[in-house]
């Protein structure tokens, strides 16, 4: 197992400006500096996920390209959380109808259009086609979708293309993660990012701590 960001970097969080977080990007950036983060990625949801949600007003779409950090030295990156749509190579990879340089590959039950029993096939095709753009794969052991997923097969195809997986502790803390499949994932996957997937400042501060403690308890890291 290789953890790629045991230092002060967090590459998964959501804002009020562009997605379903409860804090603005300016608030996130200021707080990140207070908790010693040096680099963060704002990874708000894709256009189709926003369309399926009523959590944001229409004005959320306007100014993502104009956001600059004027407060501190935290390096702020803008990525997008892609959505798998089906097992026919289709994904939604835009936010504000633009495609960022890097993406998180994810699946949300309310967005996925086809039979969830074919979820492994959908992941496999998306990885084959888009692996050069995928920064990592979002928490696949979430309760809502993991029952349809063969985690070993997903590990095998991701490892083949050197795609890291996310260890996401917000959902585990709130008891929304399949622990058995999560531990199997830790066993078979080779590279990981530890991210908060924070939707508020509390999760931004605490989630990575829980992940690191869990990995220490399981003897994956010292």
Image (cartoon, helix red, strand yellow):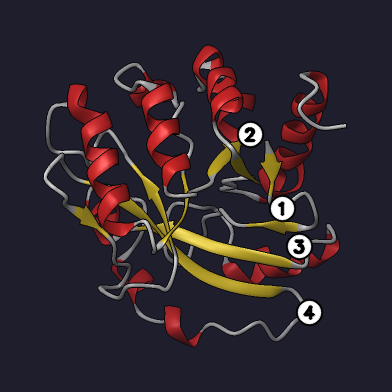
Taking 181 as reference, is 168 left or right? right
Q: Secondary structure at mark 3?
A: helix
Can residue 112 be seen in this snapshot?
A: yes
At horizontal 24% and vertical 36% (from top left) the residue drawn is 110
Tell me which numbered mark, 4 or 3, is placed earlier along the sequence. Answer: 3
Taking 134 as reference, is 47 left or right? left
Residue marked by disc 1: 5
CA distance separating discs 3 and 2: 19 Å
Choose mark 3 or mark 2, whichever is in front: 2
Taking 53 as reference, is 80 left or right? right
CA distance separating discs 4 and 3: 12 Å
Q: Secondary structure at mark 2?
A: helix
Q: Secondary structure at mark 4?
A: loop
Q: Residues within 10 Å of mark 2 (few under 14, many from 20)?
A: many
Choose mark 4 or mark 3, whichever is in front: 4
Find residue 21 and report its horizontal and vertical position in percent. 51, 53
- Residues marked 3 and 2 touching at CB (< 8 Å): no
- Residues marked 3 and 1 touching at CB (< 8 Å): no
CA distance separating discs 2 and 1: 14 Å
Tell me which numbered mark, 2 or 1, is placed earlier along the sequence. Answer: 1
At horizontal 62% and vertical 49% (from top left) the residue drawn is 200
Which residue of the protein is positioned furthest toward the front in this rendering? 160
Taking 1 as reference, is 149 left or right? left
- Residues marked 4 and 2 touching at CB (< 8 Å): no
Residue marked by disc 2: 169
For residue 31, the mark is 3
């Amino acid at each position: 197992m290789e953890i790629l960001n045991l230092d002060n970097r967090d590459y998964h969080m959501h804002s009020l400006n562009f997605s379903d977080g409860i804090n603005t990007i300016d608030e996130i950036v200021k707080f990140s500096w207070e908790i010693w983060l040096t680099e963060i990625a704002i990874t708000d949801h894709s256009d189709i996920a926003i369309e399926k949600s009523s959590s944001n007003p229409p004005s959320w779409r306007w100014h993502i390209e104009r956001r600059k950090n004027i407060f501190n030295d935290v390096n702020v990156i803008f990525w997008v959380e892609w959505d798998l749509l089906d097992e026919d190579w289709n994904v939604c990879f835009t936010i504000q109808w633009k495609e960022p340089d890097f993406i998180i590959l994810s699946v949300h039950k309310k967005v996925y259009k086809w039979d969830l029993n074919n979820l492994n096939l959908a992941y496999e095709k998306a990885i084959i086609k888009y692996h050069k753009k995928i920064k990592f794969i979002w928490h696949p052991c979430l309760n809502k979708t993991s029952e349809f997923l063969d985690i070993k097969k997903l590990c095998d195809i991701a490892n083949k293309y050197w795609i890291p997986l996310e260890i996401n502790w917000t959902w585990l803390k709130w008891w929304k993660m399949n622990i058995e499949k999560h531990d199997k994932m830790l066993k078979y996957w080779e590279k990981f990012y530890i991210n908060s997937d924070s939707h508020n400042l509390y999760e931004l501060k605490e989630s990575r701590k829980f992940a690191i403690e869990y990995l220490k308890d399981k003897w994956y890291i010292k």
